[in-house]
């Protein structure tokens, strides 16, 4: 059986085992979780996380060096960031529309009095942009600050291109290091079915049927918006912009999506999503190495959808009507927050707190959705990395056409 099939079976088995234990044997779950489910999941997560920083660093260097021309790098960067901002805007609008139609806040009685949430302060957008340049690159790598790692690696890649033959040995070393990391990714993926089983059994078992049933309509809204966004926005990108089949895209990218679903982390899934994009979607290393690490940091379409649905849900629960101007403010705040909170831990809930505050909704309402956020986080992470890959395919195809056109013109 192929690895994708094994992972999907492990996901289903983990969900069933977790739910059954929660419903019929909660005592057994409390015994199995710390000694079986959590260790399986944590070992797999640690193995992947171990590779993230070196892979991002080495691949960005190769990407910048492979692109060569700084103008080409700037063009690809502009395409990538523009794509992420546009799709984030589309995502939150989809979330707002679906929640406005379905009205999840009217579906039941919610305990508003006991809802609590303490929001952390997010840094201003300007500060985040200024902090992209690291004072200490080694500290950035130790802390896992992706934006700073990307910036430092870009400088090195451009310098290697400028120096040419003088630094060919270093470039070869970086290529060998990248090959080594990708081999380790393949090795770690052998443990993916066991890790995904443990992660799903732990997540579903801890949340349980009670939380899922109480927030069922809200969950359905978020999942429906994620599905629609994935099919229309990303499928449309592949079909209309990249001129390829959406079925081909989702079928080949499924292994990375399944790992993202179980880990709930775009950064942790990055080594797998890059390998899949390069080997199965035929995205050149130079493009994949730049677009996907950047997307894992600033592309948060799934989170934007959650914010749209959660904003309407909380407004309905607290019986507060939002005007069209306030809804426009929600969209604008969410898009800006996706950049301003890049790389901040717990980014989804911090972004939601910023959005709620921008239109005067009580931040405490986030406490209502915390119970099932872990489950939804898995799905929106799978959507996030799909957006990164769709952007990489789109950029790769447009650059390929540009190169062919230039060759013909030159001829």
Image: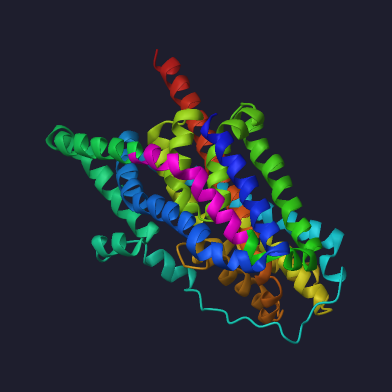
Residue at 67 percent across and 77 percent down: it is 367
Pinpoint residue 138: horizontal percent, then vertical percent: 24, 61
User: Does the stretch in magenta take in 307?
Assistant: no
The span picked out in magenta is 184-203
Q: Quadrant of residue 246?
A: top right
Q: Quadrant of residue 354?
A: bottom right
Task: Classify 333 as above or below 78.
Answer: below
Q: Residue furthest left?
A: 166
Residue 162 visible in this rendered orientation of the protein: yes
Taking the magenta stretch, the answer to whether it contains residue 191 is yes
Q: Quadrant of the C terminus?
A: top left
Residue 401, image x, y percentages: 50, 24
Percent across and percent down for residue 300 are: 57, 56
From what the image shows, is residue 361 above or below residue 381? below
Query: Is 163 situated left or right of 132 in this image?
Result: left
Is 76 or 372 nearer to us in this picture?
372
Q: Residue at x 82, y 65 (%)?
A: 104
Residue 81 visible: no
Residue situated in front as seen by the camera: 168 or 274: 274
Answer with left or right where residue 267 lies relative to residue 363: left
> Magenta region's main secondary structure?
helix
The image's colouring method is rainbow
Q: Residue at x 61, y 63 (%)?
A: 374
From the image, which quarter does the N terminus lie in? Answer: top right
The residue closer to the viewer here, 396 or 21, is: 21
């Amino acid at each position: 059986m192929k690895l994708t099939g094994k992972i999907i079976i492990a996901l289903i088995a983990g969900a069933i085992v977790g739910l059954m234990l929660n419903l019929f044997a909660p005592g057994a779950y409390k015994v199995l979780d710390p000694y079986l489910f959590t260790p399986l999941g944590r070992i797999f997560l640690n193995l992947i996380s171990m590779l993230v920083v070196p892979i991002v660093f080495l691949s960005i260097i190769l990407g910048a060096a492979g692109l060569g021309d700084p103008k080409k790098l700037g063009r690809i960067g502009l395409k990538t960031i523009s794509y992420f901002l546009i799709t984030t805007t589309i995502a939150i609008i989809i979330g707002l529309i679906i929640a406005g139609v379905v009205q999840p806040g009217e579906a039941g009685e919610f305990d508003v009095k006991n809802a609590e949430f303490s929001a952390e302060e997010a840094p201003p957008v300007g500060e985040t942009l200024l902090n992209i340049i690291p004072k200490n690159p080694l500290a950035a790598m130790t802390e896992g600050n992706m934006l700073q790692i990307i910036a430092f690696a870009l400088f090195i890649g451009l310098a290697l291109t400028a120096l040419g033959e003088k630094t060919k040995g270093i470039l070869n070393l970086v290529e060998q290091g990248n090959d080594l990391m990708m081999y380790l990714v393949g090795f770690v993926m052998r443990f993916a079915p066991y890790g995904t089983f443990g992660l799903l059994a732990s997540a579903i078992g801890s949340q349980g049927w009670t939380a899922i049933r109480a927030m069922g309509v809200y969950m359905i809204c978020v999942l429906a918006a994620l599905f629609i966004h994935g099919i229309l926005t990303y499928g449309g990108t592949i079909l209309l912009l990249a001129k390829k089949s959406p079925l081909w895209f989702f079928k080949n990218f499924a292994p990375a999506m399944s790992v993202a679903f179980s880990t709930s982390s775009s950064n942790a899934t990055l080594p797998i999503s890059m390998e899949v994009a390069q080997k199965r979607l035929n995205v050149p290393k130079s493009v994949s190495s730049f677009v996907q690490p950047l997307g894992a940091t600033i592309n948060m379409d799934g989170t934007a959808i959650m914010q749209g649905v959660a904003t309407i849900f909380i407004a309905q629960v607290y019986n507060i009507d939002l005007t069209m101007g306030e809804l426009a403010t929600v969209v604008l705040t969410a898009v800006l927050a996706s950049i301003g909170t890049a790389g901040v831990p717990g980014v989804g809930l911090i972004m939601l707190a910023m959005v709620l505050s921008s239109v005067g909704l009580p931040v405490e309402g986030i406490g209502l959705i915390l119970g099932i956020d872990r489950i939804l986080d898995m799905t929106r992470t799978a959507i996030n990395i799909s957006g990164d890959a769709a952007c990489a395919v789109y950029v790769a195809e447009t650059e390929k056409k540009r190169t062919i056109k230039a060759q013909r013109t030159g001829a």
